[in-house]
């Protein structure tokens, strides 16, 4: 095989498997609200979005997914990114139908964590 054919086959293989590594929230029915988990409790959690912090409650029918795996609420952790599909109550709280864990970090308004900023500053001083 020539070099061009091998490169084309490798590229196609990578494109074909790209969906395995990332969970696409768009595959779910309903509007996905994405954000960072700021606190977790027995009956729900708080999700910090671009527009503010939202309280999310669980029901007995709430499904939890991490990638393609079904998990439970014990997988929720403060600081993780998550997506929620559910019903918004008049109080502003959301009753989650689905909670999507393991979402990639948002590129919009990304602020480096303090340890990353400190590391970058240290590198510039040398």
Image (cartoon, rainbow, N blue to C red):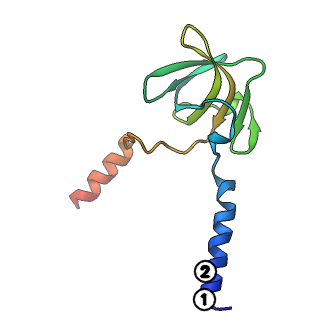
Q: Position of residue 38 (x, y in %)?
A: 50, 26
Q: Quadrant of the N terminus?
A: bottom right
Figure check: 94 above or below 112: above
Query: Would residue 109 appear left or right of 94 to someone viewing this image?
Result: left
Q: Position of residue 26 (x, y in %)?
A: 63, 40
Q: Are marks 1 and 2 in contact (CB under 8 Å)?
A: yes
Residue drawn where x is 67% and y is 55% of the image: 19
Q: Quadrant of the C terminus?
A: bottom left
Residue 12, image quadrant: bottom right
Count of number-bearing discs: 2
Label 1 neighbourhood size at 10 Å, few (<14), some (14-19), many (20+)?
few
Image disc number at residue 84: none
Q: Position of residue 66 (x, y in %)?
A: 68, 40
Q: Position of residue 77 (x, y in %)?
A: 59, 32
Query: Would residue 110 appear left or right of 43 to someone viewing this image?
Result: left
Q: Which of 5/60 is in front?
A: 5
Q: Kindly identify which residue carries mark 1.
A: 3
Query: Would residue 123 appear left or right of 92 to someone viewing this image?
Result: left
Residue 88, image quadrant: top right
Figure check: 82 above or below 122: above
Label 2 neighbourhood size at 10 Å, few (<14), some (14-19), many (20+)?
few
Residue reaching furthest to the left? 125
Residue reaching furthest to the top? 91
Which element is circle 1 on?
helix
Q: Kindly identify which residue carries mark 2.
A: 7
Which element is circle 2 on?
helix
Residue drawn where x is 69% and y is 55% of the image: 20
Figure check: 80 above or below 22: above
Q: Which of 95/37 is in front?
A: 95
One can see residue 55 in this view = yes
One can see residue 41 in this view = no
């Amino acid at each position: 095989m020539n070099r061009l054919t091998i490169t084309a086959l490798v590229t196609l293989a990578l494109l074909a498997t790209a969906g395995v590594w990332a969970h696409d929230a768009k595959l779910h029915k309903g509007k996905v609200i994405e954000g960072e988990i700021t606190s977790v409790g027995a009956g729900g959690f708080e999700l910090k979005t671009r527009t503010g912090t939202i309280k999310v409650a669980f029901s007995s029918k709430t499904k939890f997914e991490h990638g393609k795996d079904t998990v439970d609420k014990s997988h929720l952790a403060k600081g993780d990114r998550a997506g929620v599909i559910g019903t918004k109550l008049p109080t502003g709280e959301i009753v989650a139908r689905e909670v999507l864990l393991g979402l990639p970090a948002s590129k919009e308004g990304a602020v480096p964590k303090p340890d990353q900023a400190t590391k970058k500053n240290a590198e510039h001083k040398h």
